Amino acid sequence: MLRISLTGMVSLPYLVVTSRLSCKTVMRTLLPSRKRTSTSLRSGLSLGSVCPMINPTGNAVASSSAKQRILDMFASKVGLTGQERNTDRQRFQVHPLHCHARLQPRPVISSSLSVGTSDNVVASLAARSLPCPYSCLLRPSASPADCPRGGRPPLHTGNRRYRAGGKSVSSRLLRYGLVGAILATGLCDLAPSGRSAKAAPKAPASEGRHWSFQPLRRPKVATVRDLAWVHTPIDAFVLARLERQGLTPAPAADRRTLLRRLYLDVLGLPPTPEEQQTFLHDTSPDAYERLVDRLLARPEYGERWARHWLDVARYAESNGYERDGTKPNAWRYRDYVIDSLNKDKPYDRFLTEQLAGDEMDGSNAATQIATSFLRLGTWDDEPADPLVDRYDQLDDVLGTTATAFLGLTLRCARCHDHKFEPFAQTDYYSMLAVFEPLKRPQKGQEELDRLAGTEAELTAYREALAKPAARIKDLQKQIIQWRRKIRARLAREENKAAKPGPLSSVPPEVVAAIDTDPDKRTTAQDALVKKHGDKLEKEIRQAATPDEKAERANLDHEIAAVNTTKPREPPHAYVWYEESAKPPHTHLFRRGNPAKPADEVGPALPAVLVSKQPQPAKPTARSTGRRLWLARWMTSPENPLVARVMVNRIWEHHFGQGLVATENDFGVMGQAPSHPELLDWLASELITQGWRLKPLHRMILLSSAYQMSCAPNPAAAKVDPDNTLLWRQRQRRLEAEVVRDAVLAVSGQLNPQMAGPSIYPALPQAVLDGQSRPGDGWGKSDEQQAARRSIYIFVKRSLAVPELDLLDMPDTTSSCDRRAVSTTGPQALTFMNGEFMQQQGRYLAERLQREAGADSQAQIQRAFTLTLCRQPCAPELQAAVQFLERQKKQIQEDRKRLKGNHGDAALQALEAFCLVLLNTNEFVYAN
């Protein structure tokens, strides 16, 4: 029996469901005849903004896939299997609601809908709810309606039903088309069965729960006919699906292709010619397996895979908004991620450190730096409403945590119960209470970081620093007095000379700021000192007498001497902090407005995810312990999501798409897994392996599924055009950073230096001028430093490196699960004519001349080996030789016309050829 719990009544003047969810249908559904020309709903929401099937102009969306996704979503909600969707043809009739009550409370429609064999659809009222007049909508077709168009039906309680007349539709469309129409319009809120938004959450029964909320159970490895193809259990699950569809997997990729794919996937760099030869000449049966182990042990692995996680963590080193100020020491979080992956830190600990590294036993600098994850979002340093901004920041923390680790869109429940997921507004604020104690270190508009280390380390440092710090402060006061003394002398001399004019070109407010104790300066004064302090200092030093200069030199010398006695400073971490173990109060906000607090809530987990709430958090001496409480639940056997979400992310980056295609959304609106048994098997295997990621990588890389070629198969494409069943490897374009790193590697310019502060590659002036504050906030790195790997480039929200931006580097405002892949004209223009590519093409040409000599064919063969990891075929070699000859001839002719010598013509021709190779699809694709 389909059960819809209504805890109130809604004003639905008309509700007509047809076999096609067209714009006119939904308009008839929502509005009485006299108001059909309007697109505004009684709830005050725009029709286009609340109904995903309709655009803002009111026209029906034509995408059949979008419609199917909506239908599948609601079919999943009512628990219909694929077979039930196709075979259920019971006819229903729906009656318009012209006669029904208006301006009634909004209902909450249950997410735990069930279907029985009787095919009766009953609108059942929750306990203590208002009577509902709409059950006449939800009954199999019978005789004419008891509810005349011009009248009003008697209100009732319980399960009394009305017979209804109207247009006939199938029960399939009624079951999830009708519910879909109601939910999609935003006129009804979604909540678990028998619960209102204000009620305390109750855990639903496990039956009928969404697939991702089900407990994690390790399935048996699938049985297949072609046992020779099965190298790992992964292959058995993949092949079983293919065999059921009558499909066969693509043949294995050749060794050169597989070698290049493996290097780019694991390290993000192409193999060198020497590495190519070593592998290709190794004919032992375990050559590939040993290569996999070697690559996973290399430090470049951490750099490659850290970039994937930084996308999820919305990593950036600036705040966004107009000023886009720098996040001090945020780069240490990047280095923490790289180091953790290289050490194969268990994922459960990796998660715990990022959420609660400061609350863990044995907390140290590394675990505290890990909590920078919570603070990497955007920040408005001059908000119009500080209270709203405070909860916007916490919303970012909560939303990113839920998305990154759980694959859930919990942020949608901030202002109301989630429209499509089984999360009440209470769930949102109960989870928000976990992060409510966090405080942001700042001084006005200035971001502050904090010292990181164990309590003993920090105490020892402060004690050792106290004496030299006090002495330096005293010396700084003497310097301030020294400046004042000189200015006073200059003033007396000016008075004696009776010459009008300013004593200094520096404004008085700057002088006042410089004379203020550094510990007592305001943010504005700090900015003035930073901008004008050197100028005033220079003027005063120039005006000083020899005795005054000697006095200042003594002070400077003593400060330098005292500085040498300072203890080594612990690392600084860009983190939140908690002031005490006493938790603040958390309230549910009406419509998400912090100015309208309602009921108080405490830390709790979403009811749909737990059968029983865990024991309350235990405060520590310096924190509430709430984040550690949450992290421990996330990594406990009771949580089925964390392992599933992480193995899906790993799978995505090896195959181009996750087993769940919506990597950041495992909820009802997300897609179902293509291989559910494989997903659960991998998740359980991750836990069995102690949450270590490298064994998971190894198993995937050794599988026949991973080693398949991308060879097309028309017959398979007809059955599975999207390659959902994995009958071949997917063509995958390299990410922006990998393309840049590969260019630097083949040109011989890549600097392998790891870790440390971020770098600033040279950018065109037009790019620098395009910042929110032109010319501000971009440093300078020398050419050698700028040639480090792209993961070390400073990530500024208001500015992007053109080569990275054009290849779809993600927006860092929110978590990114999968990068977009676009093909645009500016990509070709920049990669052929851009300064960076021109420079690297020249370096590559010089390398070819050094390593291959002056012979054109040898240069071409070396170029192909470096860039494409293969030798050119005969037609390619011939065409390349002819290209070089034509280019050289054209360059020489141009010189004659220009009457000048402009360098080596052969080298310039080779540069052009190198640019051609660097711009080929083969270079920028992994397969």
Image (cartoon, helix red, strand yellow):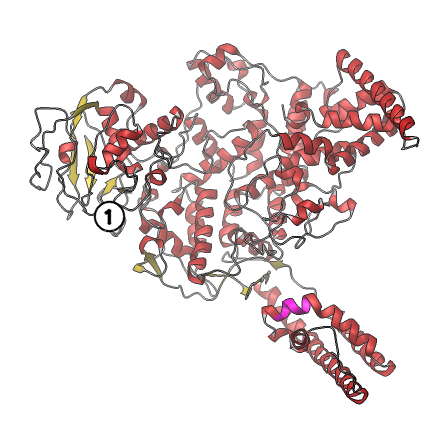
**Depth order, front residue of 410/489:** 489
Residue at the spot x=25%, y=36% of the render?
Answer: 36
Q: Is residue 45 above or below residue 519?
A: above
Q: Position of residue 574 (x, y in %)?
A: 58, 57
Q: Position of residue 442 (x, y in %)?
A: 55, 64
Check if residue 49 falls in the magenta segment: no
**Depth order, front residue of 57/198:** 57
- Specify the quadrant that holds the N terminus: top left
Q: Is residue 788 above or below residue 55?
A: below
870 lies left or right of 94: right
526 lies left or right of 120: right
Quarter of the figure with residue 292: top right
Q: Amino acid at mark 1?
A: Ser
Q: Which residue is mark 1?
A: 196
Q: Secondary structure at mark 1?
A: loop
337 lies left or right of 473: left
Q: Is residue 268 visible?
A: no
Instruction: Report the span colored magenta.
Output: 525-530
Q: Is residue 99 visible?
A: yes
Quarter of the figure with residue 369: bottom right
**Depth order, front residue of 58/437:** 58
Residue at the spot x=33%, y=56% of the render?
Answer: 589
> Overall secondary structure of the magenta stretch?
helix
Q: Position of residue 332 (x, y in %)?
A: 62, 52
